[in-house]
Amino acid sequence: MRAPLATSLLIAFMASCSDKSSDDDAAGAAGMPRGGAMSTGGAGTGGSSGASGAGSGGAPAGGAGGAGNAGMSSGGAGGSAGAGMAGSGMAGASGSGAGTAGAGGAATTGCVVPAAATDQPTLLSQTGCVDPADPTKAAASLIPYDVNSPLWSDGASKERYVSLPVGAKIHVKDCTAEPDTCMPSQSGGTDEDEGHWNLPVGTVLMKVFIIGGKRIETRLLHHRNTTTWTGYSYEWNDDETEATLLPDQKDKPVGNQVWHYPNGSQCLECHTKAGGRSLGPTTAQMNRDYAYAEGTMNQLDKFEALGLFDAPPPRIAGYPDPQGTADLELRARSYLQTNCSICHRPGGTLSDVDLRFVTPFKDTSLCNHPVNMATGDPNVPQTRLVPGEPTESTLSFRMHDTTTYRMPKIGSTVVDTDGTKVIDDWITSIESCPP
């Protein structure tokens, strides 16, 4: 066994549900579809800046996309759209169209936040976020991404995409440039991590869940206004030809497990305010390569090349892959960051323990700290973490449990055997609590 990793390594890492909005949430240029109404994209503007072309409301046909830009439509039958490909314009095609990102900016997109939360389309193919002819494919205008330390989702593999409103920029939390934001929240700071991507109003995040090679669910998370995010769950049919919006939570047998489809309020139990709501898009999660259709590229470089940041973000090192080859403690802390710190952090639902990656181990309130819940229950270990003893540590016990005391408390009923092994091995390696 060995002593916990020195705090200096963590310091070194640091150095390297819903309301109706009062107006158009998605930066509503004329020609954007609202509440499923047909709308037609106009001509995309040319130029090297990469600004997407705004559609002209009611225009009978989509114009040609300008260089590196796109006009688009997500409308009813007979709608036309201009589709701007990277670096050159193309004539509008009949039907619903989607422009791919140009070299200088994100394409116009039909994957938008409806004017009212109740206007959410019933079918995934109607949302503008997927190819209506093949809903298994994301709309060409969406940007795919991946993360360094994924959230455990009962063994499901995932596809992740983001749609940004036309002309809007991502603001990245930077403690050097804006030190006041990194003060404690009671002193005027914000609770989300340094490097968190503050996505603009009108952003849509899409995540596809796949088990046994088949799509079972697609979730959409909308940034409706400055204070509100809303979540929607679409259930795929067995043939994977369409997914339908669920009116409420649902449990469904999938193979040898039960899959939980959350309702909107349950989405926000994990997508916490303290965690920043969007969770995945942070510099530490996104600082990695992605195999885009046009070639492999670092995701930070890609978003910067598309002109999507309001300022170049500091290059914070990526979280270690919990199943990778980095130091055991760093991998364990990375797992806890993603799966636990969304609630267990300052300002979080349960802030008496701090499981953020950047928090020194001695300050987490884990080691030899008594539990504050289930006190006195003989079935539950009464200490959060006992050095060298995972079976006597509540941290391990709750990850292994599948009943009352399971963590996470929602959205998971299947034990992550690889993840629990990382945590158990880390606890086993700890000789004593740090002073």
Image (cartoon, rainbow, N blue to C red):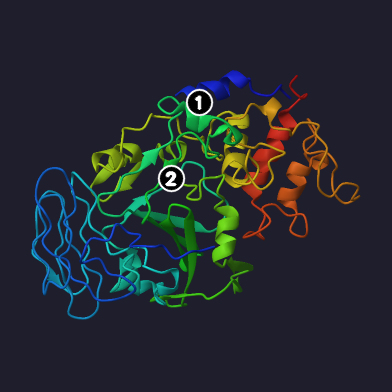
Mark 2 nearby-residue class (10 Å; few <14, some 14–19, many ≥20): many
| Residue occupying image coordinates x 43% and y 52% | 226
Position in image of residue 18 (x %, y %) = 50, 64
Side (left or right) of 98 relative to 381: left
Position in image of residue 216 (x %, y %) = 49, 69
| Residue occupying image coordinates x 63% and y 20% | 6
Q: Specify the amino acid type for callout 1.
A: Met
Position in image of residue 251 (x %, y %) = 62, 72
For mark 1, what is the residue?
14
| Nearest to the observer: residue 401 or residue 28 | 28
For mark 2, what is the residue?
281
| Residue occupying image coordinates x 26% and y 58% | 141
Q: Specify the amino acid type for callout 2.
A: Pro
Mark 1 nearby-residue class (10 Å; few <14, some 14–19, many ≥20): some
To which quarter of the image does residue 114 belong? bottom left
Side (left or right) of 28 relative to 317: left
Position in image of residue 404 (x %, y %) = 78, 59
Report the number of numbered marks.
Answer: 2
Q: Earlier in the sequence, mark 2 or mark 1?
A: 1
